[in-house]
Image (cartoon, rainbow, N blue to C red):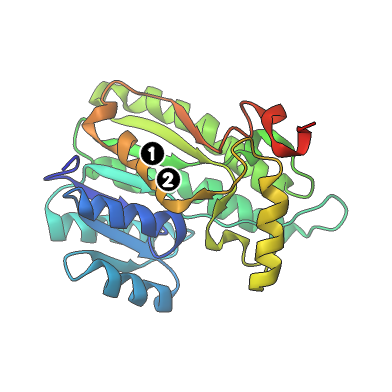
Amino acid sequence: MRLENKVALITGGNSGIGLATARLFVAEGARVAITGRNQETLDAAARELGPDVLVLKADVNDPEAVGRAVEATVARFGRLDVLFANAGISGFTPVGKTSLASFQDILNTNLTSVFFTVQAAVPHLNDGASVVLNGSVLAVLGARGYSAYAASKAGVRAMARVMAAELSPRRIRVNVVTPGAAQTPIWSAAAPTPEALAALEQRLARGIPLGRLGEADEIAKTVLFLASDDASNIQAAELVVDGGATGAPFGAPIYAS
């Protein structure tokens, strides 16, 4: 039980990586609160995770709503030991074809809201707490058409280092988990049918040395490590979970002779 007697708040905990992490945290002994803005998926998560998990409807783009979610978590469980700022969106923003509103929506959700989520949590975090931010390999890969998403995730990487410097006097650790392509609902817009999704996954897998997309559970296990006392001396780090796509790209099947 690596999170026994710990309290964790997960934004975007109603699907994908957030839900997988909530599930794992509960199994590891944590008392967990999750947020999301889709009532249907929140209800489904509540049924799956059980009555001991606090489920809160909150849009991370609303700092006051996030503040209320933090306060509700502390009111329910009496403390806050772990924050996983996971909520985020993707979006295609090619040069020459992108509106200001579309670009700003991605930056606001993936970067600005992360800052204000941490800011809301900091007064309530125990000394020695763990903050984990969700990044992306697209921060460094230069994927065509993803300027806003890449910029937002590159900002998360940089911001984590600043936050770690500011919060180190309280021994609060701030680290980043950086997923590569993984089987999560974030692909639904690009591949709206099962057939389209299967084709997309096959194409993406050719560029991954391990030859497959990651799974949400694999990323959740990395978040668990960073949240736990096993990572007690890890600060301002970025753990990449991408099957080797950024570290050993020429090992991918697409380059096989």
Task: Determine which of the numbered discs, if any, sits on residue 222 in the image.
Answer: 1
Res 17 quadrant in image = bottom left
Q: Amino acid at mark 2?
A: Glu
Q: Point out residue 216 in the picture as x, y percentages from the top left corner.
A: 45, 52
- Callout 2–callout 1 Cβ contact below 8 Å: yes
Q: Amino acid at mark 1?
A: Thr
Q: Point out residue 254 in the picture as x, y percentages from the top left corner.
A: 76, 39
Residue 215 as seen in the image, left or right of residue 173: right
Res 132 quadrant in image = top left
Q: Point out residue 211 in the picture as x, y percentages from the top left corner.
A: 62, 42
Task: Determine which of the numbered discs, if any, sits on residue 152 in the image.
Answer: none
The residue closer to the viewer here, 39 or 29, is 29
State the SS at label 2. helix
The residue closer to the viewer here, 232 or 256, is 256
State the SS at label 1. helix
User: Is residue 88 positioned above or below 53 on the image?
Assistant: above
The residue closer to the viewer here, 248 or 230, is 248
- The nearer-to-camera label among 2 and 1 is 2
Between marks 2 and 1, how big is the CA–CA gap? 7 Å
Q: What residue is disc 2 on?
A: 218
Residue 206 as seen in the image, left or right of residue 247: right
Residue at 22% x, 61% y is 72
